[in-house]
Amino acid sequence: MDSPDTTRRLRIAVVSLLLISIALLLWQQLGLNRVLRIDGNTSYRLQAIDDRDDGGASLATLTKDGKRLVFDCTLSDRYEWPFCELAIWLSEQPQDGVNFSRFETIAFKLHSTSTGTRRLRFFMRDFDSGSAKADDPLTWRLNELQFEPHADGREIQVPLRTFNVASWWLVNNHIPVERSAVEMHNVPVLLLDTAGVRENARQRIVIDYIEFRGKWVKADEMAFLIIALWLCAALAYLLQWRVGMRSKLAHSRERETQLSRLNAALMLENAKIGEKAKRDPLTGALNRAGIRDALLDESERALTEERPLAAIFCDIDHFKRVNDEHGHAMGDKVLQQFTATIRKRIRQRDYLVRWGGEEFVVFCPDTSLEHASQLAESLRTTIEANTWPTGQRLTSSFGVTTLKSEPLADFLERADRALYDAKRQGRNKVVTQPPPD
């Protein structure tokens, strides 16, 4: 058992770990925020692009209004796929793009008015140096999100996992299905586009901000950190416990050696006292204390290994007359001879117990109810035919049963009941009571 001081230290350590865990979880939820914001004050290069280079007649312009970006587009249906596009260059070299894997959501706060379709598209182009060409942006992976801004310009927040790779890009670049997932590990450019609908329309998009939000430490990473912290603490405790147990064991061995030397002269005397405490001093049979451990062991073995265990309760009939007519000294001699007679008739592995007064019990391991009943009948006839110190004929009654899967108290009570039935039926009998089904 741990000392109170050790228990107190353990409680302090557990409480401290709990507080640290709670603090880390709160820190992860309420702090550790990582933000990439694009607005009128951004340092990234902005570029208004339209379809005129592709033979269209659409016109895109970009101006600033304080911290806001104002993107105007006049769409013409001259081109089959008219568009206006706002490009946000996060890096001038494609291999130096931004890794968005640490971000979780994107937020748009913008207001869109249009004489046609208000729907917008947002693209994140990822450059993979292993497959994309630096001088051909069309080979850069096109992660796509389509949305329609709120009419009142309220913020829209979308998880980055909502993005998908544009299907036409996958087809045009012959991308196998195993490489068709969204990738955002190296994004050099962001694109805000009109809906791509062929129409004549005027559209104005006023952008308060586009903001990427994430955590410097993700929730699953923080959970892993906390679990690792607890595991390390548990390992440290186990190591400390092992060292402590080794120390206690060494101390215990030293103490045992000292006690052995101190008590060497008393060992024989102690052994005799222990033997007397477990045996009846008059007859030498076991007493109740002496049979306790053995009976527990034998009953467990019988139930575990499905082997029978029998109990034979026996009582000297009218023993009180012996004491009354011949004195207690003669009664003691009768008890001693009675014990010796039974001991000669049972096996060495059986247990003879003086249960109290003139009542004895024989516990027989590996003995069925039938064989125990036969042994009891043999004992009864032997006792009846024996010559006793009083010169009188003595008889005895027997109650026999075997153990089932039950409490030991029920087993003993049933054997005692069988003995009572033998006495009630006139004594000098063997009554067998099998265990209940």
Image (cartoon, rainbow, N blue to C red):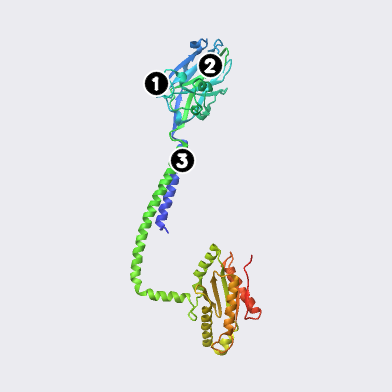
The residues bearing labels 1 and 2 have C-alpha atoms spaced at a distance of 30 Å
Residue under label 3, please give it.
Answer: 223
The residues bearing labels 3 and 2 have C-alpha atoms spaced at a distance of 45 Å
> Residue 406's image quarter?
bottom right
Residue under label 2, please give it.
Answer: 204
- Left or right of 28 in this view: 303: right
Mark 2 nearby-residue class (10 Å; few <14, some 14–19, many ≥20): some
Q: Is 418 above or below relative to 244?
A: below
Quadrant assignment for the N terminus: bottom left
- Left or right of 85 in this view: 427: right
Q: Answer whether labels 3 and 2 touch (C-beta < 8 Å).
A: no
Residue 277 placed where, x, y %? 46, 75
Mark 3 vs mark 1: in front: 1
- Ranked by sequence position, the earlier of labels 1 and 2 is 1
Name the secondary structure under disc 2: strand
Residue type at tag 1: Gln
Residue 87 placed where, x, y %? 46, 18
